[in-house]
Image: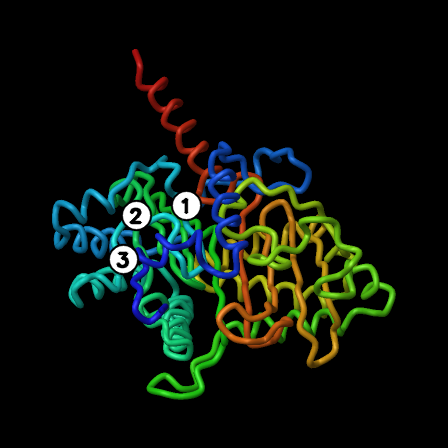
Amino acid sequence: MADQQDVETYHKHLPDLEPPWLHGLYLHWLKLYQEPFKGVTSDGNVKPNLFHLTPEEIPIPSIVTATNHLLSLLSPSQLKSTLHHIDSPEWRTWSNPEFLLSNKGIRLDELTPTLRTSVLAILESSLSPEGYKKAISAMRINHFLGELVSAPKICNEFSYNFVLFGQPSTDTPWGYSFYGHHLCLNLFFYKDQVVISPWFTGAEPNMIDSGPYKGTQILQREEKLGLALMQSLPGEKQQTAQVYKELKDPKMPKGRWNHDDQRHLCGAYRDNRVVPYEGILVSEMDQAQQGLVTQILDEYLLYLPSKAREIRLSQLKEWYHETYFCWIGGFGDHDPFYYRIQSPVVLVEFDHHSGVFLTNKEPAKFHIHTLLRTPNGGDYGMALRGLIKEGLVEQKYLWEP
């Protein structure tokens, strides 16, 4: 029974779990992991020179202090599991389902309250106040789900792993991954610049309706803004944006829909996905509609500290001439749907899902998946790492007699 299994036992029995496609998904993800990192692209070719080293005024001293404090409290075995090289491929082994594919780092529900608080202090110092609130809300909703389906050892407020890559520093690159069911965050730091990408945030259901955290809700703003944008388009543009009329459309090519990701394309282990542009150009929308796109992207940048968020949003707006918006499903007030906004420098997805733990066989508005990717090698700060290494090589050359 799920209520009697811990996460390691649950993973051990993964080949026997229902539905049987879960194990097949696991094996497919392992195959994708063997591919060298390239990054999400629109045509298989990485566009160069899209990203720059930019001061963003993040509180890097506070983040480093919080992280070093945690490290000072860990046992030798916990340190061994938690610390990885900055370029470790293990950074790519995050995943959002409740079953644990990659058991690295430290898991919050196995820690003392003191250690758990120290991990959360790192999150709080790294994210905006609103972003931290959203992350904590996702964790509390996950706990609520665990109570609903009697699986508290699999889904709870602290069923998340924390992994460190590189050494915490105010002047050299490092980062961390925080991942578990419906909340996965990857943060890369260099001096006072941060990349939070890829990230995944979901909820089933997306609101707590009883207990101490009653009224907690997430992802409703992304939903309302997306629908408002689609409904505001003139009929001809709606038809072009709506690439499929049904959420599981017979016209979809094989693989466009799958049991786990359903419609979204760039979740766990999809680091090298080729996602062709679809839909309509944002630059061809009117001013009010472009304003809605900006509000959606601003919401997807919520995890970033304020200055970094402001800078990033400005950068994204510069690409509206090559930013596409597409839609799947109906767009009535009560219709479930999928949408994507995609450019060379950002890809965000929103998807209403059918039930996994709950019983709705068709997609419903209370089960939501959202994610953000930085295409063309931007995920995990990979593109910035290349610039950092180039700069170090140039400095070494200049220092030589």
Looking at the image, can residue 306 be seen?
no
**Residue that badge 1 annotates:** 93
- Report the amino acid beneath label 1: Thr
Amino acid type at circle 3 is Arg
The residue carrying mark 2 is: 104
Q: Residues within 10 Å of mark 2 (few under 14, many from 20)?
A: many
The one nearer the camera, 81 or 306, is: 81
Instruction: Report helix, strand or loop for mark 1.
Output: loop
Q: Please tell me in which quadrant of the rendered image residue 263 appears.
A: bottom right
Locate the N terminus and report the quarter of the image it occupies. Answer: bottom left
Residue 129 shown left or right of residue 80 in the figure: right
Q: Which residue is most to the front?
A: 16
In the picture, the quarter occupied by the C terminus is top left
Label 3: element kind: strand
Residue 107 is tagged as 3
Occupied quadrant, residue 397: top left
Q: CA distance from mark 2 to mark 3?
A: 8 Å
> Which picture quadrant has residue 325?
bottom right
N-terminal of the pair, mark 1 or mark 3, is: 1
Identify the residue shown where x is 35% and y is 52%.
12
Q: Residue at x 55, y 58 (%)?
A: 260
Instruction: Determine whether, in the image, residue 401 is placed left or right of residue 390.
Output: left
